[in-house]
Image (spheres, grey):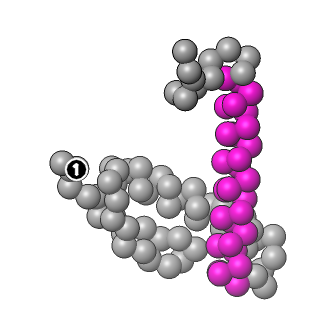
Amino acid sequence: MPGPKARVTVRILGEEYNIKGDTTPERIEALAGYVDRKMRQIAAADSRISANKAAVLAALNIANELFQLQKEYERLLGQSGDKGPHRSG
């Protein structure tokens, strides 16, 4: 049975969001802070950009970071000879 859900109010690009999750409040705050920083970087590069566009661009940047990390992870697995949890044999 899952534990209680954390409830946290965070600010992202000046807007408040009430977040409920299966992790610690500190983790939720750290994630929100990361997203806020990404959105602020994008907004700083073009002051005319809307919050919605900044959110989409931040999501794309974060997805790109994830894909790069996954690729690096797979490369490292290949170097170690480990094929991960789906290895047969």
In the image, 85 versus 27, the foreground residue is 85
Query: Would you call the spot at circle 1 few (<14 residues within 10 Å), some (14-19), or many (20 or more)?
Result: few
Image coordinates of residue 63 in percent, x first then y, are: 68, 56
Q: Is residue 81 left or right of residue 11?
A: right
Q: Which residue is mark 1?
A: 2
88 to 32, vertically: above or below: above
Residue 9 visible? The answer is yes
Q: Which residues are magenta?
A: 50-77
Residue 73 picture quarter: top right
Image coordinates of residue 21 in percent, x first then y, are: 34, 59
In the image, 16 versus 88, the foreground residue is 88
Count of residue discs: 1
Image coordinates of residue 8 in percent, x first then y, are: 33, 64
Residue 40 visible? The answer is no
Going by the picture, which residue comes out furthest to the right? 46
Our reading of the magenta stretch's main secondary structure is: helix
74 to 33, vertically: above or below: above
Residue 58 picture quarter: bottom right
Residue 17 picture quarter: bottom left
Indicate the secondary structure of the residue bearing disc 1.
loop
Residue sitting at 53 percent across and 77 percent down? 14
In the image, 69 versus 79, the foreground residue is 79
Image coordinates of residue 87 in percent, x first then y, are: 57, 23
Circle 1: residue type: Pro
Is 38 magenta? The answer is no
Q: Is residue 50 left or right of residue 86?
A: right
